[in-house]
């Protein structure tokens, strides 16, 4: 686990995006899970809603994700799939990756199902990285079945 500033590149961009979402989201923030993958059709995902909000990209992405990550909103649950260019491809997806045997979990940390799904999901072929953020837990970034960065949302 690394609590140092994230590296540059995709992992740094993902950590920055998650920090931006958490800071913008306010008191209604339910947390967020992101999957970076250019082929969402290959993922074990299922839409939780039968509609999709108007998607935003670029500079508007952080505000868009913060807005849909509100507990009272219809799209706060599940994971959102972003391309490697950080463009939204799928919103509010149930994500059910298989258990990866041999992964060691630090059970002294207060994590939940979103953390474990992101950890296991990062080991799937085609997944570049996964990341989660919640007000209480913080931000965690995963690659190839390993937590590679952890930081605070405060």
Image (cartoon, grey):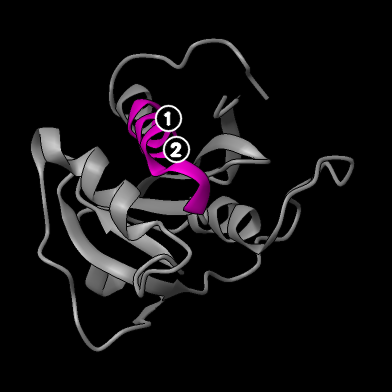
Q: Position of residue 11 (x, y in %)?
A: 38, 28
Quarter residue 112 falls in: bottom right
Quarter residue 69 falls in: bottom left
Q: In the rendered view, would you say 123 is above or below 91? A: above
- Front-lying residue, 97 or 93: 93
Q: In the rendered view, would you say 104 is above or below 17? A: below
Residue occupying image coordinates x 20% and y 54%: 38
Residue occupying image coordinates x 52% and y 56%: 30
- The residue labelled by disc 2 is 22
Q: In the rendered picture of this protein, how many numbered marks are placed on residues?
A: 2
- The residue labelled by disc 1 is 19
Q: Main secondary structure of the magenta part?
A: helix
Residue occupying image coordinates x 76% and y 53%: 102
Is 48 within the magenta?
no
Magenta extent: 15-29
Quote the CA–CA distance across marks 1 and 2.
5 Å
Q: Is residue 120 in sight in this rendering?
A: yes
- Front-lying residue, 62 or 3: 62
Q: In the rendered view, would you say 121 is above or below 108? A: below
Residue occupying image coordinates x 36% and y 22%: 12
Asked if labels 2 and 1 touch by Cβ distance under 8 angstroms, the answer is: yes
- Label 2, secondary structure: give it: helix
Q: Position of residue 87 (x, y in %)?
A: 15, 48
Screen quadrant of the N terminus: top right
Q: Residues within 10 Å of mark 2 (few under 14, many from 20)?
A: many
Q: In the rendered view, would you say 52 is above or below 54? A: below
Give the side of residue 64 with respect to residue 35, left or right.
left
Q: What mark, if any, has residue 57 been given in the picture? A: none
Q: Residues within 10 Å of mark 1 (few under 14, many from 20)?
A: many
Is 27 within the magenta?
yes
- Label 1, secondary structure: give it: helix
Q: Is residue 39 in sight in this rendering?
A: no
């Amino acid at each position: 686990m690394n609590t140092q500033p994230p590296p540059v590149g995709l992992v740094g961009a993902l950590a920055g995006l998650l920090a931006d979402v958490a800071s913008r989201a306010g008191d209604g923030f339910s947390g967020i899970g992101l999957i970076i993958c250019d082929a969402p059709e290959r993922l074990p995902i299922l839409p939780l809603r039968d509609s999709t909000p108007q998607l935003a990209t670029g500079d508007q992405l952080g505000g868009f994700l913060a807005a849909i990550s509100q507990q009272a909103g219809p799209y706060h649950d599940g994971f959102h799939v972003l391309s490697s260019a950080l463009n939204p491809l799928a919103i509010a997806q149930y994500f059910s990756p298989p258990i990866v045997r041999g992964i060691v979990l630090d059970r002294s940390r207060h994590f939940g199902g979103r953390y474990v799904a992101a950890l296991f999901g990062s080991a799937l072929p085609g997944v570049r990285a996964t990341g989660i953020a919640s007000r209480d837990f913080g931000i965690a970034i995963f690659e190839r079945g390993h937590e590679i960065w952890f930081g605070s949302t405060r």
